[in-house]
Amino acid sequence: MKKRNLVENGDFSKGLEGWRVENWHGTFAAKVGKKELSFEIQEEGKESWALQFCSEVALKEGESYVFAMKAKADAPRTLNVNIKKNAKKYLPYANGRIIDLSTDWQDYYWRFTMKEADDEAALISFDMGGNSTSWSLKDVSLNIATGDDLGRSYRGRIQKNSGYFNAPNEPWELHFYSLDGKLRKILDKGNGGEGMRAYPRIDQSGVIVVKEVKKVKD
């Protein structure tokens, strides 16, 4: 049975339908090709979030997903990819990745489990600011993980510098879960706004999730 892509117009056969361009502190143009997009960076801005290309997707608490994409760039560059809560308070659902793009098309994919409450409008965001190199994207998909997906390692599909996460703006904890969903330990914590932080090394199999922590009233 063919998997159903949860990303609307993930192959860009309908142009930019279901997607939006967000120029916060810079400008770029998304040009539609044959089921692919090219991004011309005109003014890169200072931060990666200054330029964003986004789409909404529905996520269910406790469900495991596989996110996949293909990308290349005019010259080697990095790209931030996030799946997160669409709100001013930054809350990552899939531990955003920093990936290395080369001048050839490459496949990128990883698995994650939704540990927060259902979100019918979670945001997939490609953050491309802070770098003037133009790049291209195609075949974006998000599928519910099957039995085969759950038993597969995705570590080799992610680039070497993807071992970082963007700390939320609010107090947070880094939780380590076993593959059957049980919390094993809290690996790290912070007050919010620390920026990119490295994941600690773990010798056990499991899932690392950034969790927002509610403030305790005095």
Image (spheres, rainbow, N blue to C red):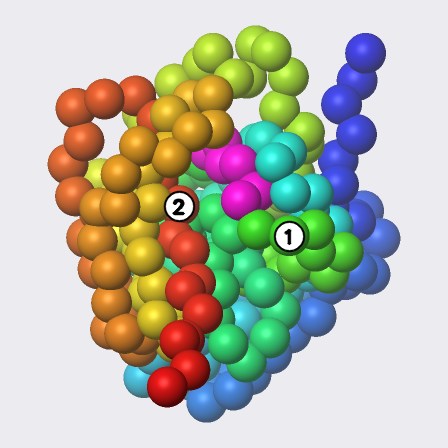
Q: Tell me what residue is drawn at x 76 percent, y 56 percent.
A: 120
Can you see residue 180? yes
In this view, the residue in front, 150 or 101, is 150
Residue 140: quadrant of the picture: top right
Residue extending furthest bottom? 25
Residue 149: quadrant of the picture: top right
Tell me which label, 1 or 2, sits earlier in the chain.
1
In this view, the residue in front, 133 or 204, is 204
Q: Which residues are magenta?
A: 109-115
In the picture, the disc for residue 43 is none
Q: Amino acid at mark 2?
A: Val
Q: Residues within 10 Å of mark 1 (few under 14, many from 20)?
A: few
On the rendered structure, is 97 left or right of 160? right
In this rendering, is residue 98 above or below 185? below
Which quarter shows the C terminus?
bottom left
The residue wearing badge 1 is 117
Residue 203 image position (x, y, % from top left) = 16, 24
Q: Tell me what residue is drawn at x 51 percent, y 52 percent.
A: 93
Residue 62 image position (x, y, % from top left) = 61, 36
In this rendering, is residue 25 above or below 41? below
In this view, the residue in front, 193 or 66, is 193
- For the image, the number of numbered tags is 2
Residue 82 image position (x, y, % from top left) = 48, 56
Q: Tell me what residue is drawn at x 53 percent, y 44 percent.
A: 115
The residue wearing badge 2 is 209
Q: Spatial distance from mark 1 to mark 2, Cα to Cα?
A: 14 Å
Can you see residue 38? no
- Is 85 covered by the magenta stretch? no
